[in-house]
Structures are given as structure tokens and as C-alpha cells.
Amino acid sequence: MVPRQTKVTADLFWSAALCDGILPATRFPRSKTAFWPFRMFARNHPAQAIARMSDSNGTPSKAKPSTGFSTLSVHAGEDRQKLAHSLTDPIVCSATYTFTSTQAVLDYIHEKQPREEYGRYGNPGERVVERKLAALDGGEDAVLFASGMAAIVGLIMAKLNAGDEVIFFDECYHRSREFCTKHMSRFGVVTKQVKACDYDAMAAAITPQTRMLISESPTNPHLSVVDLEKFGALGKKYNVETLIDATLATPYNCRPLEYGIDYVLHSATKYLGGHNDLLAGVIIGAKEQLEPVRKLRGIMGAINSPHNIYLLERGLKTFELRMQRHNANGQAVAEFLANHPRVSKVYYPGLETHPYYEVAKRQMRGFGGLITFLVKDADWKQTAAVVDGAKIARIAPSLGGVESLIEQPLVMSYFDYKPEERAKFGIFDNMIRLACGIEDTVDLIEDLRQALEG
């Protein structure tokens, strides 16, 4: 299908010193062709997000028709020239931002001078990362949060009121479901769940009070893949907003906005950050639709620290390179597991035996590094022995980092659930979730072989 035309925001940012005239205007003249070191270049279309970088003589370079994904990862959203001629963006550790005069405050209030005011409302580095993430997903704007859960909580609270309904596909991160069923219900929001990828059931569940449809794609931990055209069409038909949590896909493998989805969510803790050293989340969509989300974030204070923002920007520089290895490792390990006699089932959308393989092949460039599988004829303790036997993968929750991680969903996430509840959510005693890192493929396979056969 032809990607939906989108627009990247044209917000400009100058440092407080330049905005307020601390540095002499003669050194940095404000003209269209002048060298202006704090003008952000990402603008008219995600594929051209670096097109307005200044060339060597200070004039904007001609817009390119398209820009490669890795080039966007490295350059999108950033200044061509940075403070003190640094190659990397500075870490701005300031709780508040000063004004030189009352008039400067009034100019800020009247939006004449885009800049920062107070740390809870934004950070210069945060703006850079938001533009970069919006460009990677083909979105107009992005709002960065302190975690993936903070992002979905912020969106839901900004969009839903008492009496409204939200509908989930039932395969999803259990904390997302728990927030709506246990907490939003206290404020009069009704949560409904229907079988994953059952679009007729979702349509039947929609009422005049329904305000949002939510799904992951791929889902966690079963890796079902939502037909994004069908999901987006449901939202348009019934005038209901749609959200896809694409954490497991990443914008490298799939861009849901191109299929008519309203919002994309990522836990940037995972593949986007990529190093298991930060927490972050992001919502991407249209600027106008995200404005109430941004305002609520400023009230909630669910912001990221300047150092985390720096780590996320640095991690994004190698995003495409890492995803290529995650995809390759995931595919190879899934194929190995599918042919191992001690494995009874493998959940991985890159396998032809996967029920949503055709959908995944149509929508996705690659299938990621997460694999779920069942150990044949094993109880939970025998399954734990396989987990404990791994020498490379570490036992931990999460995914998307350079290190491989392994865990039992029963133990890690559902141990307090009753057996019938676990069965309802498709969580089995012999289930293992493996998040492939970027280690050598042959080493991961041999490590799993010895763990299964030991």
C-alpha cells in the first residue's frame, strides 16, 4: 500500500542564551540563509527529516527525495552545529531555564520564541529525541515519557473520561491490561477484551461510548501479528482512535501509522535504547492529537532525566545495525527450536508455521529477536531447568538489549495468578520466553542446545 502522507513538526529551538539575546545577534543573524546553530532541521516529511541540514557554507542543502533509515537514526532531529561545536548533543542538567527580561517571558508565553521554561515541561535533549523518534516512525510528533507504562498511562488518561470505553485484544502486556481493568475502572472507564486478531469480535464490542482500540503487534508473549489495515479501518469506520504498541516490531520492522493507525507506542527501554541501561517510553502520532498528552505529561511529571535522554539518543545511532542482528538471530534461533525434539511449539512470526506468518510477511521487514516456545512434556520445574541451564542468556525480564535474556512467563510475570487465569491468557507451565541479543548466532544456538539436552 502507499504510505499515508505525514508531516514532521516544524518547531524551532534555540538555547535560552540565544533566545534572550545573551549572545550577540551580529554573530548569529536571524535570516533564512544565515548560519543559525540552534535551528532544528527535521521538517516536511519523515523521509526528508535531515534534508535541511546546513552545508559547509551555512546555506540549507536541497531537500532529498528520501533518506535511509540508518541516516535518520544518526541525524534526524539534530542541529547541524551544536553548542561549543560539539559533535554530540550536550546533556542539559537544569531544573529550570532563565529569562533575561519580562518581555522575554511574554514572548515565550505568546509562542514567539520556542524554548524551555521548566524541566517538567521539556528539555532540549528531549526535543531532539522526540523529533528523531517521530521521523523514524513516519509521524508528525512524539511525546517522550519516563517509561513505556508511563506513556500508555499518559495517553489513556489524556483521552478517556468517565463513561468511556476502551477495547483491548486479549494478548497484551499484563500491566497495560491491569492499569485499565483495576485502575481506570475506579474513574468510570469501562475496559473490554476480545480475542486477539478477531476483528469481527472487536467490531461487535464497539458502542457509541467506545473511544479507543488498543493492541500490541506483535503481541507479548505469543507474537500474534495484527492486520494493521483491518485494525485501522475499524477505527475509521466507527470514529474511534486506535493505538498500536509496536515495541516488539520497532519502526525498523513496521510503521503502523502508514496503515491508518492514530498512535504508536514504544517502550524505548527495549530495542530503541537497546542497551538495557535506561527506561523510556514514547507515543507517536499527529501533533494536534498529542497536544493534550504532552500537557498531561507536564502535570504528571512523567519525564525522563537528561542523562537517560542522552543514552537513548546515543542508542538510536546504532538502531538499524542492532535490529539487523536481532532479526537475524531471532529467525535462526526460531528455526533451530522448531526442529528440536524437546520443543513442542515455537511462537515466532518469521516461521511459516506461525498462524499470522502471511500478515507478518506483508507488513514487516523483519520479525525481531523475541521468541516464545514450549518445552515438550515438561512441568514448570523441568522448564526452569532449561532456563537455568542457559550459559549466555541471563535470567531477567525485558528484551531488545544487546544481551540475550531468558525467562519463564509463569514465574516472572504470572506466578501470583490462579491456574485458570493463566490458562485464559495462554500462559503455560512449560513456556519459555527468549529475547535474542546481538551475540553470535551460532553461540546462541549451541547454548540453547546444551540447555535443552543437558
Image: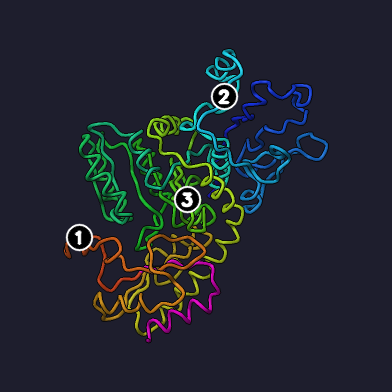
452 in the magenta segment: yes
Q: Secondary structure at mark 2?
A: loop
Q: Residue at x 30, y 48 (%)?
A: 168
Mark 1: amino acid: Tyr
Crowding at dot 1, Cα within 10 Å, few <14 / some 14-19 / many 20+, comes out as: few
Q: Secondary structure at mark 1?
A: loop
Calculate the distance from the C-alpha at mark 2 to the C-alpha at mark 1: 51 Å
Name the residue furthest top.
Answer: 103
Q: Earlier in the sequence, mark 2 or mark 3?
A: 2
Q: Residue at x 78, y 26 (%)?
A: 27
Q: Which residues are magenta?
A: 433-454
Q: Which mark is residue 268?
A: 3
| Horizontal relation, residue 264 to residue 365: left or right | left
Residue 18 higher or lower than 52, as above or below:
above
Q: Which mark is residue 98?
A: 2
Q: Secondary structure at mark 3?
A: loop
Mark 2: amino acid: Thr
Q: Residue at x 76, y 24 (%)?
A: 29
In the rendered view of the protein, which quadrant contains the C terminus?
A: bottom left
Calculate the distance from the C-alpha at mark 1 to the C-alpha at mark 3: 28 Å
- In this figure, which residue is indicated by the disc labeled 1? 417
Pointer 2 with pointer 1, Cβ within 8 A: no
Residue 108 higher or lower than 118, as above or below:
above
